[in-house]
Image: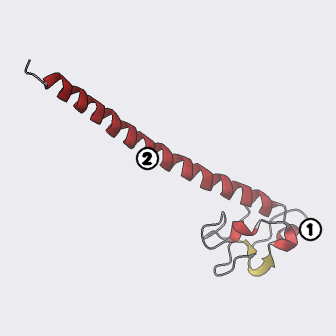
Amino acid sequence: MKKGQGAFEYILLLAGIIAISTVAFFILRGTTSKQGMSVEFSQCKSQLINVNPCYYSNGTWKPDGVTIYKTAAFGIDPKCTSDAGGGLAGSTWDVVGSEDEFKCGDIAPQ
């Protein structure tokens, strides 16, 4: 073994550990941010389920993609309809271009 070879091997080992840790960090960070988005979507859908005008008197869903409602009138968090990535943004219930409005949409939230 040459002089200094052991120290160089330890440096390579340390660099490998740092590289693996960095990759693991970014992979785990990506999965937690996706979970946060799905939780927000679930919370927004559960708020939408409680909106009375979206139901017929017999309790079935009233598909209506035209009538627009204000979120404040029904206790829905305005963040749900934010075009900047709210839980319902881009869904059948979102009113594009509005930060505080929603519609019942063509399908019932499950």
Between 100 and 26, the one nearer to me in the picture: 26
Residue 51 lies, with reference to residue 2, above or below; the image says below
At label 1, the amino acid type is Ser
Quadrant position of residue 68: bottom right
At label 2, the amino acid type is Phe
Mark 1 neighbour class, 10 Å CA radius: few under 14, some 14 to 19, many 20 or more: few
Residue closest to the far front: 3
Q: Is residue 61 visible?
A: yes
Q: Residue 108: x, y in percent? A: 74, 63
Q: Viewer-nearest of labels 2 and 1? A: 2
Per the rendering, the mark at residue 57 is 1
For mark 2, give the secondary structure.
Answer: helix
Residue 48 lies, with reference to residue 16, above or below; the image says below
For mark 1, give the secondary structure.
Answer: loop
Q: Residue 40: x, y in percent? A: 67, 56
Give the Cα separation between the discs numbered 2 and 1: 49 Å
Quadrant position of residue 67: bottom right
Per the rendering, the mark at residue 26 is 2
Residue closest to the far right: 57
